[in-house]
Every structure is written in C-alpha cells, then in structure tokens.
Image (tube, coloured by chain):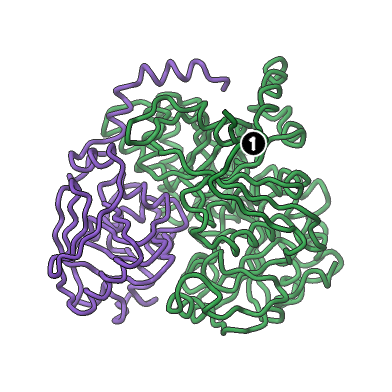
Chain colours: A purple, B green
Amino acid sequence: MAYDKFNILTSSAVPLPIENVDTDQIIPARFLKATKREGFGDNLFRDWRYNGDDTPKADFVLNNKTYSGKILVGGKNFGSGSSREHAAWAVYDYGFRAVVSSFFADIFKGNCLNIGVLPVQVSPEFSETIFKAIEADPNTQLEINLPEQTITLLATGQKESFDINGYKKNNMINGFDDIDYLQNIKGEITAFADKLPY
Amino acid sequence: MSKTLFDKVWDSHVVRKIEDGPDVFFIDRHFIHEVTSPVAFLGLKGRGVKVLYPERTFATADHNTPTINQHLPVQDALSANQLKALEDNANEYGISHWGLGHQKNGIVHVVGPENGITLPGATIVCGDSHTSTHGAFGAIAFGIGTSEVEMVMATQCIMQPKPKKMRINVNGTLSKGVGPKDVALYIISKLTTSGGTGYFAEYAGNVFEEMSMEGRMTVCNLSIEMGARGGMIAPDQKTFDFLEGRLYAPKGEAWTKAVEYWKTLKTDADAVFDAELNIDAADIEPMITYGTNPGMGIGISKHIPSADQVEGGEETYKKSLAYMGFNEDDVMIGKPIDFVFLGSCTNGRIEDFRAFAEIVKGRKKADNVTAWLVPGSHVVEAQIKEEGILDILTEAGFVLRQPGCSACLAMNDDKVPAGKYAVSTSNRNFEGRQGPGSRTMLASPIMAAAAAVTGKLTDPRELM
C-alpha cells in the first residue's frame, strides 16, 4: 500500500539500549489476531511497557515522558525473530518514522522499508555516541536526511552516512510502491513463468 | 563459472535485475496462513487486483487454532474471525484452503513437504520466518512480511537483493543422544542470533548427508534463529524417495525429468562462499538453552557461562538471566521444570514423536509436569496412532492433542503461565514467547522426554 514519503526527518529520539530486541517483544503474538492494520501502536512493547494488570511499568522508556520523538534508537540486532510485519506496523502506528541501530535483523528491516519506516544502520561507535547524547540531553535533535543518506546530531554536528539501495531510496522519497512496479512488468513475469519447470 | 547450490536456484528465478536495487525474484510456491495474510488480502481488494497465479498459493490454518475439540466452533471470537477471513479470502480468490478440521490441515511447514508442494530447486515463501524449513529439500525458502505476501499474490514475485552465501560444514560422528536439534542449537550458539544475518546458508558434510529428511527440516527450520534468511541442503536419493508419490509431486515422465534436474542441484567443487564454518560433530552435546534467545545454548552438562563469554553486552545478559531466574555458573541438570512441549514446525514430525516415545516407554510422566504433545499435522497424528506410539504415550500418562502451532507462540490457549519453566522442542525462547512471563528452555525431543518423566532437567543419555 502507499505510504508516507520520507525526505528529511528532524526529531528527538527515544533510546532503547538493549541488544537482540526481538519482534515478540515489539509486538507479542497474542496481539496478532486482527484482520485489519489498526491500533498496533497500543501494544508496541506491550510486556515491557505494561504490567499484567495493564498498569504502565514506570521504568520503561515509553512510559517516561522525558523521552519522545519520531525516532527510535535500539541496540544491536534490532528486530530479530519472527517475520511478523505487525512489528513494523506497531512501530509506525506508535508514531516512529525511523529506527536507528548498529545492526538490524533482515526481515524486520525489509518490512520497515516496505511500509515507509526508515531503518538507519550506523556504526557501533556512532550508536554509542547517540545513546550518550540522548542521556545527556533527552531533547537531543537528530536529523536523518534520506536524499543525502546522512544522520546528524544537530547540537554537535557529528554525522555519519548510512546505506540504502538506490531503488528503495527512490521509493521512500516518492512514496512509490513495489507492487505498482511489478504490475508494470507483468508481461515479463508471465513470460518468465511459462518457461519454468514448475 | 562455478556456482553454489544457492546460486543455481536463485539465478534461475531472477526475472529482472534492478540496477542499484533488488532482484525481481519469481516465487514458485507460496504458503499462507490466517495471521499474516488478512491485511495482504485487504491490500489486493484496495487495489482491485486478482491473485495472478492462485494455483501457486496454498492456505492452511495453524497459528491460531485450538489443539483440543477442533470439531467444535472456535471460542475465541478474534481467532474465529481470523480463521473465517482465511477461508473467505481463499474461496474468493480461488486458493486451495486446508482449514481447521480438513484432513490435510496442519502446520504449514509440515504439510507443505508432506504433500509434495515443497520441491527441490523451487522458490518458496510464506509470511512466517520458519519457511526456511523447506530448504531441507534443496529449495530456496524464506519468510516474508505481509506487504510481500500481497506482492506475491498480486505478481508472483518479490523484490530481494541476493543474500551472501555461507556454508556450514559438520563432519564426523555425532555422539549418543545428539540429534538434529542439538546440531542446530550448537551452530546457533557458535554464530549467535545475528551471525547469519545477511547470509543464506548451505549445510554440508556427512552429518547432514546421513540425516533423515525430518532431521534436515529441523536444521533448516532453525536457520532464521542465527539471523540467516534461510538454509538449504543439496537434494539426494533420500529427498527423492521422500517426495515420490506425494500429492503435488510430479508424476510419470515428469517425475523422471524432475529427478534428472534435481541431481544437478549441488554446489560445484570449486564454488566460493562468502563465509564458511567448520564444526566437528564430536564436539556437540545434547543442548539446552538457558537464556532468552536461541543463541544462549549450552551442552546439558555445562554450567551457565559468565557475561564476558556471551555476545550481547552485560546489561542484556543480566536482563536475560534475571528473566529466567537463573544465575551465572548455575548447573542446568536438576533444575525443576513445570511444562513440556513437544511439537511445532521445528519438532512436530513423526521422527520427533518416535524419539520422545523411545524415552518415555515404560516410564511415567512426572506428577509436577504438564505436557502438551502436539503433532504437526493430521498425517503425523495418524502415523503416531498407526505405529503404536500413542499406546506408549498413553501408558506413560501422556495425552495427544490435535495439530497446530500451539504453545510455540501461544496465540491459542496453550500458554505457559508466568514464572513457570517449560522445556520446549520449539524454536524460540524469547521473553513471553510461550505466554506472558513464561520461561522457555529449548531442547530436543529426547531432552523434553527426559524432563517430562523426571520432572526436572535431566541428561537424556542417562535414560537411553
């Protein structure tokens, strides 16, 4: 489906310096029973965010009003485990438009790109720099510039570039969609299929 | 140019290469289930698009189904609604549907191979990360997100950059009590849950050559747990024998032709991999996990390692052990347990039930243990009965449930309560995976059986 265009995002960020955050934490399986893409943000990090009786856990970062913004900064190997796109939907629905990590799990990263959430992979050192900057000042502004492929800590000017393939970058900047592309070459696909053994 | 098995299958399915972008990759077979497909169908409806090749997509209900009283209406309204949505969508778009109660129903990664839908050299996707299972047949199989489920239904293609290639060689002789699950958990403990990210794995060496198809499926199934998108094993006579005569497998002349082609599906002698890992089979012990990701596994006789020996940082490690209620240097043997789960797309096949039965035969389920024994499909269930395994299980005080994903992800009522310990033959020990607050230890079917009859973690070799 069509999604928001992404160009330059300037925002404060929410830090989650935990490694190997899996998609079962991002959205537990018991919240995958919907048949529509609605309301997943309410259950983002459900079991880290709420107690069993649905009261908020005070020590979890999403319940700490000090931190807010459209950027989520996670630890290494963010989004491992299940292929559930619901995890990316929950991140989006909560209000995040970019996730920063020193390493992403493959399927989660692809899912984010497919729904218009930008995964920004930075070096472990820069990840550390960002976490420290947010710790020192929770209002630290980050600028993510997709056309330039850079992420910048605006207060200090510290900057790093990130990778994204040209095709996906163009899609995200323009809100283009893979299915439109593929439908446009349908003849090529069906001709290809005719030649396959099965 | 020399090619790997993966290259051969991948390259033969590239419709078009996009410059500075992904490949347009053709998908031969597509599995769907009730949880990750409804929004994809909504997308198709929104676009007013039909399914391009409905005969290439197969629907089965598994993630969100009860494992008792399947003949009764599903009580949970949301689950019932999701199952109905799958049925309605499959009917509307002309897709085959093996719903709850259907003779062919079962876990998607069990029924695919069982019915010969899974074939060597094929490309297979499903909105489920354990789609890697089908790599056991020399197929390229991997999990996708819901946007891609919609993409495959609309165009039979996805957009994927070609992954890097890794070969994992396990050679030598496996010790007593060491099976496919232990081999996989050992590999993941070496590579960590991110060591395979960006790669597609090929499993090679005499250990995999000698392994049954069921065992190969267990190993390939767990490829995603080291971060790899998938893993595959070159097809051989065992693969062909498994598939011959199955419902969707080629027949007659087409079969002969297919086998001829499948015999070419192996890595050329001088082909190069981006990474290679060599493991001596003799180093592998029966494995158990102690933490909250599948990479946190050790031999059953070992002590829990200290933070500095584990990847993931001290804070993450401490959080993990605190969740499990364990301490550094703890001995695993003798730890009390509450639940045992035999089943899932990892270990819900006939061989897993045979192995479990071998241990519990002539023994009794421990009183402190609740055991869920869930076959991967109705076919497996029938085999369990035919082979007399059910009698052994019943005699030992166990009850057999009906097929489904069950306590592996606890979407249905099969939930481990908070704080309780489960020895599980499934694939993930993440926090809350088997129910909020549940504590999971991943292991092989015989390790699960040993725990079930002794009521605590026990070295299964002592019961063999």
Q: Residue B364: x percent and y percent?
A: 80, 71
Residue B142 relative to residue B38: left or right: right
Q: Quadrant of residue B457?
A: bottom right
Q: Residue at x 78, y 49 (%)?
A: B385
Residue A170 showing in the rendered view: yes
Asked if residue A33 is positioned above or below residue A137 in the image, the reply reads above
From the viewer's side, name the closer residue of B363 and B2.
B2
Asked if residue B28 is positioned above or below residue A66 in the image, the reply reads above
Residue B40 relative to residue B322: left or right: left
Q: Residue at x 74, y 75 (%)?
A: B458
Residue for badge 1 = B270
The secondary element bearing badge 1 is classed as: loop
Q: Residue B92: x percent and y percent?
A: 40, 29
From the viewer's side, name the closer residue of B41 and B18.
B18
Q: Residue at x 36, y 56 (%)?
A: A87
Q: Residue at x 36, y 62 (%)?
A: A102
From the viewer's side, name the closer residue of B142 and A148.
A148
**Label 1 sits on what residue type?**
Asp
